[in-house]
Amino acid sequence: MSFARPDFLLLFLPLAAIIIALYLLRMRRKNFMVPATFLWPAKTEEIRANALFQRLKPSWLLFLQLLALTAIVAGFARPQFAQRGLAGETTVIVLDSSASMGATDVLPSRFSDAKALAREAIQAARPGDQIALIEAGPVPRVIFPLGNDAARQTSALDAIKGTDAEADVGEALRLASAVVANRDGARLVLLSDGDFEPIKDFSAGKAAVVYRKIGIGGTNIAIEALGVSDTTRGRQLYAGLKNYGGQPWETSLSLYADGKVVDSVRLKVAAHSTVGHTIAAPAGARLYEAKIDPQDVLKADDYAAISSDPTASLRVLMVGKPDPFLERALALDPRVTLDKAAELPPDGGSTYDVVVFDGVPAQPTASRGTLILGDAGTSNFVAASGVDKSPKFLRSETSPIMKGVDLNGVFIDNAQRVTASGDAEVIARSATGPLIIVQSKPNRRQLYVAFSPLESDFPLQVAFPIFIANALDFLGGTAGNGPLVVASGRPFATPAQKAASIQTPDGGKTDLAIVNGLATVRETRNVGNYTLTTDGKSRPVVATLRSPRESDVAPVAQLALGNRAVKSTQSPLRFADYWRPLAVLALLVLAGEWWLFARRS
């Protein structure tokens, strides 16, 4: 046992001395003449010498008062007992539900083990403790806020299911920190295997961070790559496997075209190595799939799929300063794989379908589509001649890019004053000049916007994601109605007017809300085949996981959180205060002392 404030114990001596002094002092009374003293036998001692002090006599009242004082002083000193446990008086548990937490090196899985630890912490909480739970999934969410209703909390915990997706653990920790950062003695408990990106922008405030590592490691083989291309030898299908374990492994690889097996082979993969396999693929197939059966610890990366439609996937490079609004709008398109860079690569972005310049001078690119926002640079279809301050939108022309986009009321701080070349088309104007210009040539399309989104309130308007979706359709090509391959767990939007729903691999069906002509899908949290239905038309959706970080299932013993390193702790110490029982004891003793005094009186 220890004391959080041992200095309060020093108060016992002066306070006890005061109580004892009161028992040494005699009461000074006035003299009265009485007929005889035998009428007051209990008071005969008070007619003796009326000195200031008297000899201390044993007294139960004195003993009880000193006992009550001892309990009160000890309570203020806050006695503490060290205990083992994840939870403290105020605790936010962050539960990692990413794909790697589905590894079975800990039976039945890492995620189940993490849920069991969270359940133990909830059930071991004392009446005054408060616990909250946040799921660190593709989109972090609060499962229950701070409280101490163990039955309700356990029920909410049991309802959580793991995902086959990457998790945003950093955002989940920042959300947890916002809940308890200003509370003394608060604790953030992360239940995870540590397989996520380093977290740079994070501060726990006054809260202590506890990291409990889940998992022991094991062999895992993943489908690292799956692609199809048309060559001089015909259509070729390529699959690449990677062994993330320390031992060589052998597995079977099966390749499918529109659900039919086209090849099956046994492959040996050396430790920490990659092996590839290429075959001639049927030219008319719309969906190619790959499956392996390695009997490893993670199943989510044993399946991959790819669509043969060239517009079914778009590699987009965003050049410029960070713009979370634009990034979020681009990510809503299920076809987009987004990369970011401060400047254009030397090859002109030849490996990308669309290059986006946001607030930086545009340059010639080698991609088939270019989106320029705010600075025409060296563009060959737009010439800049100055700056317009706060231009007002005037009108827009009939164009697929402007379908569902209303710029009325959009505030623009600064816009370039530009003129368009002869083969370019102005599709939106302000009172002082063009706002949006397009140019379409064979295998080459460009779209120019005279202002950067961050220099306007356009990103705050409902028209902004619609405009970005229309722009991607124009620059990269309108997606067909064939199978749609998406990253598991990643939300995406799809056009819909009347009704939209999605059927999950287990047969469940979820109706989707439609806002401004778009339905957002957030239900593809697991690898498998889904069916998306919009306005009576159905389309297959295939969710896959291809994430080297999730496939590398070796648990991490030390995390980088902000500017500090946090090591895994098996079961941290917790110092529990016991001032409340001492306060109750003091009240009981004082009640007994009052009863004894009243009885003697």
Image (cartoon, rainbow, N blue to C red):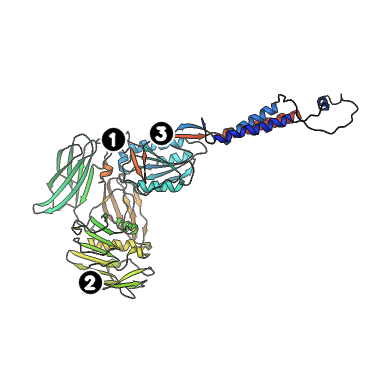
Residue type marked 1: Gly
Q: Is there CB contact under 8 Å for labels 3 and 2?
A: no
> What quarter of the picture does the C terminus occupy?
top right
Q: Is residue 448 left or right of residue 123?
A: left
Residue type marked 2: Ala
Q: Is residue 148 left or right of residue 445?
A: right
> Residue 72, percent across and down?
61, 34
Q: Is there CB contact under 8 Å for labels 1 and 2?
A: no
> Residue 203, percent across and down?
41, 47
Q: Which residue matches tag 3?
A: 571
Residue type marked 3: Ser
Q: Is residue 136 above or below residue 76?
A: below
Q: Is residue 70 left or right of residue 253?
A: right
Q: Which residue matches tag 2?
A: 424
Q: Which residue matches tag 1?
A: 217
User: Is label 1 in a helix, a strand or a loop?
Assistant: loop
Along the line of sight, which residue is nearer the eye, 584 or 39? 39
User: Is label 3 in a helix, a strand or a loop?
Assistant: loop
- Residues at marks 1 and 2, CA–CA distance in whole angstroms: 58 Å
